[in-house]
Amino acid sequence: MRILWIVPYLPWPMTSGGKTRQYHLLRTLSERGHRITLLVQSKTPADAASHAALEPLLERLIVVPRRPLKHPMTLLAGVFAPWPLLTTINGLSAPLQARFAQLLNETWDVIQVEHSYSLQPYLHTLQQQSRDFVLTEHNLESSLGGATYDRFPKWAAPFVRYDQWRCRKWERKAFDAACHVVAVTQADAQAIGQLTATPVSVVVNGVDSRAFSTVSADPQGQRLLFVGNYEYAPNLDAVQWLLDEIFPRVWLQCPGARLAVAGYGLPEHWRERWPDERIEWQGFVPDLSALQRRCAGFVAALRHGGGSKLKVLEAMAAGLPLVSTAQGVSGLAVEAHAHYLAGESAEALADGVVRLLDEPALARQLADAARDYARNYHDWAVAGNELEQIYRTLPTHQEPQACA
């Protein structure tokens, strides 16, 4: 199939769950012979490494710069436009709209737009030409108040409520306009289905099982791992909770326990805020496998967010036993005490970490069950199959046409 794939960020380097999903789905579909043109609006230029990683998967890589975040148009539209703030940040781009209109002169079997918040520059042209498109929604943004608006001051609460109202209106419009909506979890699919009559299907988040098949935890180690993109508020909250409340309790019972904090956008001031030598500030690690081999487990102390967590799936596929909140394993069909140790409080999570360190047989049992689950149900091949099944239900795009 010829696929026009549209995304509001470069999928390389894989510094977030969304980018990781984009890259591996593109890789999976490319390996199956699909011919993909990737249209990207990016806040950063595509460097040589991005071109080298992405171009082998694509027929074309087209990158259009995004205007600065504090551009006057963004600030004015964020207050007065009918679209939610995140949509105005990623929309209102005449160059992007013009490039998209040129691409629509070509024949496409699939037009796929990632994230409803990125749809604004394309929707009018798609509707004007009666073109079908698939819309993927990674998280139901209007439901993510804790994640999206966490950094707003309390006095901005009326604006937050107003923006959530705009977001829900925009989501309904976007979902209704699509021929098919793709969700990442069953819970999101059910919630989206309450907003639209458009068919909704799930394409799971995945993991590269082959890449992690030779990795396993260090049963003699005392190091726990957390990975996140620290431009995302729920990951900031998780680290603060780990270091303010959870690991002080762990250290009372296991003074030698260590915590490795890895991921993109690590705030520099954290090193001064938590100077304990048992905290290892790893930052962005392009290949996690070497670090995973030195860890006894993974702790997903997440209290906010949505979707399913790729960092958790990667830990499971690498054979790291898991301690997690319900939010940390959201979207995954795993069971507490069978696939991971559960906790919703600092005390419970600390106890789970101590159990992993003190009971290596239990840790190995959990790790083996979790690895099997990730391999069987969340390999990227599974996600690729689900996406191709959706494509087979779409009308063929030889001529512009409306949804059947």
Image (cartoon, helix red, strand yellow):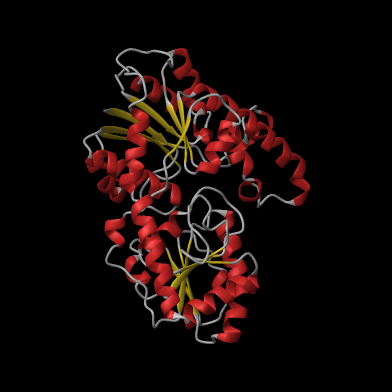
Towards the viewer: 158 or 79:
158
Q: Is residue 320 visible?
A: no
Q: Quadrant of the C terminus?
A: top left
Is 192 located above or below residue 316 in the figure?
above
Image position, residue 141 (x, y; %): 58, 40
Towards the viewer: 303 or 145:
303
Image position, residue 167 (x, y; %): 63, 34
Q: Is residue 342 visible?
A: yes
For the point 61% across and 67% down, the residue is 240
The quarter of the displayed image where residue 2 is located: top left
Q: Quadrant of the N terminus?
A: top left
The quarter of the displayed image where residue 191 is located: top right
Towards the viewer: 251 or 237:
251
For the point 38% across and 56% down, the residue is 374
Is 210 left, or right, of 94 in this rendering?
A: left
Is 27 located above or below residue 287 in the figure?
above
Total tally of numbered discs in the picture: 0
For the point 62% across and 71% down, the residue is 348
Towards the viewer: 65 or 55:
55
Image position, residue 164 (x, y; %): 67, 37
For the point 32% across and 12% down, the residue is 399
Is 201 located above or below residue 361 in the figure?
above
Image position, residue 207 (x, y; %): 36, 53
